Amino acid sequence: MADLALPETPAKTQTWRQGDLIFRWLSRGCAFLVPALIGGIFLALLIYSLPAIKKFGVGFLVSPEWNPVAQEFGAASSIFGTVVSTLIAMLLAVPLSLAIAFFLVELAPPAVSRVVSTLIELLAAIPSIIFGMWGLFVFAPFLQAHVQPWLASTLGFLPLFQGPPMGIGIMSAGTILAFMILPFICAIARDVFLLVPRTIRESAFGMGATTWEVMYKVMIPYGLVGLIGAVFLGLGRALGETMAITFVIGNSHRISASLFAAGNSIASTLANEFAEATEPMYVSSLIALGLVLFLITYLVQILAQFLLRRLYRSWSAGL
Amino acid sequence: MKPRPPTGRRIVNGVVSGLAAASALLGLLALAWIFLGVLSRGVGALNVDFFTRLPNPPGIPGGGVANAIIGTLAMTGLATLLAVPLGMMAGVFLSEFGQKSRLADHSRFAANVLMGMPSIIIGVFVYAILVLPRGKFSGYAGALSLGIIMLPVVARTAEDMLRLLPNTLREAGLALGAPTWKVTLTILFRAAKPGLLTGILLAVARVSGETAPLLFTALNSPYWESSLAGPTPNLTVTIFNFAMSPYPDWQQMAWGASLLITCGVLTLNLTARFFLGEKHS
C-alpha cells in the first residue's frame, strides 16, 4: 500500500515506470482538485461580491433594507431568518436525535435497531425539494390548523407566538429543518456511542447503574467531543438548507419577533431572486449573501471536523 | 442477596427509555407521513402522458414532463461522467499514494467541507464562472454544479473502499511484475467493485434530487431541448415552479414529479445499501 518505490530495476522497465509516474501525477492532480475547488469557490464569490462590498461596506451585514428598485441591499433580514430557523431546528433536532441514538444503541433489540437505523437514514436521503412540497401543502396547513392556534392561546402572551397563524413562516421552516438534520446528528451520535469501549459501559452496569444512568453519566461524557461535533455538522446542514426553507418560510424581507410571521433566509433569498436579478449591483449583492453563507458554513465545518477527527479516523479504517 | 436499585432511579430510567422510544417512533412517523403524503398525492398524476408529453399551459389539463425527465437524466449522466473518473483518481491518491501526505490531509479535509457545503453555494459559484461570462443559462452549467457536488462523495468512498483491500493483493500484483497503475486499475478496482459502485450510486442519489444548484445554472424550459447548450428542462426546478404556481393542474403535476424523484432516490439508496450489505456479510 505505502510508497511503492521499488529498488533499482532493469532498463527494460523504463516505460513501466513512466506509466506509473503519469498515473501518480494524474491522481495527485485529482486529489489537488478538491481543495482547489474550495479555494476557487471562495475567490469567485469574493470577486463577484466586491461591487456590493465596496458600496455597502460592513453595513451590508446589519442593514435590514432590501430594495431592488432603489438598489439598496442589506443582509440583516436574511441572516436573521437563517439564524432563527436554524435555532428552532437545533432546539428540536438535538434532543430528538440524541434520544433516538440512545434508543438505537441501548434499548432496541439488534434487529429493530438495524431496521430503524436504516429508515432514519432514508429520511436523510429524501431530497430537500420533497420536504418543501410536503411542508408547503401538508405540514404548514397542519401547523396552522392544529399547533399554532394552540400555541397562540396558551403562550400567546409571548411576542414569539403573536399574530395570525399562517402556517407558512419561520416556525414551519424551523420545524421542517429539524426533521431534515435529525438523521445526520442521529447517525453520528450513534457511532459516537458505539465507540465507547465495552468494558467501560459494562463496569458501569456492574456497579448497578440503570441504562439511563450509564448513558448520561458514562457514554455522554465519554463521547462529548464527538457529540458536539455531530451537533455542529447538523448546524452546518441547517444553515445552508435551501429548497425546503424556500417553500415554507414565506419569503419576506421583514424582521419580526413572532415565529408565526413570514421571513427569509440567506439560501431562500438566493433561490428566489437569483434567476431574476439582472442589475449588476443586485447580482453582486446576492453573491455577497452567498459569500456570507459560505464563510459561516465553512467555519462550522472546520469546527465539526476538528471535533470529529477521532471518529473520522475510525470511519476510514472500518467503513 | 443482590440489592435492587431504588425505585426512583428505576422510574426515571423507565420514563427516559419511553421517551427515547417515542422519539424513534416520531422519526419513523415523519418518514411515513412524507412518503405516504407524496405517494397519495402523486400517484394520480402518473400516466402515459406524464412520461411522454410536454407540459401544457396552465388551465389545459393533461400534458407531462417528458422533457424534464430527459433533461434531468442527461445532466445527471454528464455530471457522473465528469465526477466519477476525477473522484476515483482522487480516491486512488488518498488511498494508494498520498495517505499521510499533506496534500492528502488537505484533500480529505476539503472533501468533507465540500460535502457539507450548501448546494446553492455551488450553484452561485458555477453561475459566476460559467453562466455570467457566457451570458446564458445552460445544461452544461447545471451538469457542472451537480458534478462538483458528486466529486467529494465519490473520492471519499473510493478511498475508503480501496483502503479496505488487503495489502497482499497489491503485493501479489506487483510481484507478478505489473506496474502500480495496472495493479490499481485491474486488480484493486475489480476487488473493490461493489464498494465503488455503492459510492457512485450514493453520489448519483444525492444529486438527482438536487434543485438549488440548478435554479440559476440550468434554469428550466417548457420545450424539448436538443442540446445542453441552453436552458435545460429538469424535474426538480419544474417541481419548484409548478408547486409555486396558483394552478391546480400544475401543482398536481409537481406532485407526480415529486413521487418520481422520491422513488428514484430511495431506490438508488436501497440498491447502494444492498451492494454494501452484500460485501460485508
Image (spheres, coloured by chain):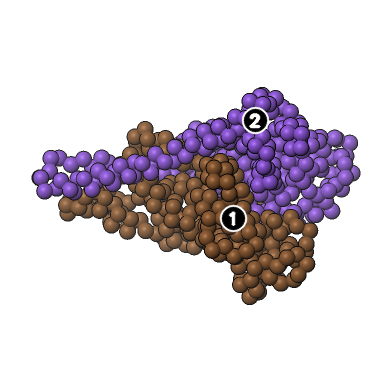
Chain colours: A purple, B brown
Q: Which circle marks residue B231 in the picture?
A: 1
User: Residue, x 52% and y 33% (percent of image)?
Assistant: A43
Q: Number of labelled discs?
A: 2
Quadrant (top left/top right/bottom left/bottom right) for the N terminus of chain A: top left
For this view, does A88 lie left or right of residue A9?
right
Tell me if residue B120 can be seen: yes
- Tell me the kind of residue under disc 2: Ala
Q: Which circle marks residue A52 in the picture?
A: 2
- Who is closer to the viewer here, B93 or B239? B239
Report if the CB atoms under discs 2 and 1 are less than 8 Å apart: no
User: Residue, x 70% and y 25% (percent of image)?
Assistant: A59
Q: Residues within 10 Å of mark 2 (few under 14, many from 20)?
A: many
- Who is closer to the viewer here, B114 or B273? B114
Residue furthest to the top: A58
Q: Position of residue A186 (x, y in %)?
A: 58, 46
Q: Position of residue A36 (x, y in %)?
A: 44, 37
Q: Chain of mark 1?
A: B
Q: Chain of mark 2?
A: A
- Tell me the kind of residue under disc 1: Pro
Q: Quadrant of residue B118?
A: top right
Q: Position of residue B70 (x, y in %)?
A: 55, 64
Up-down: is A55 above or below A10? above
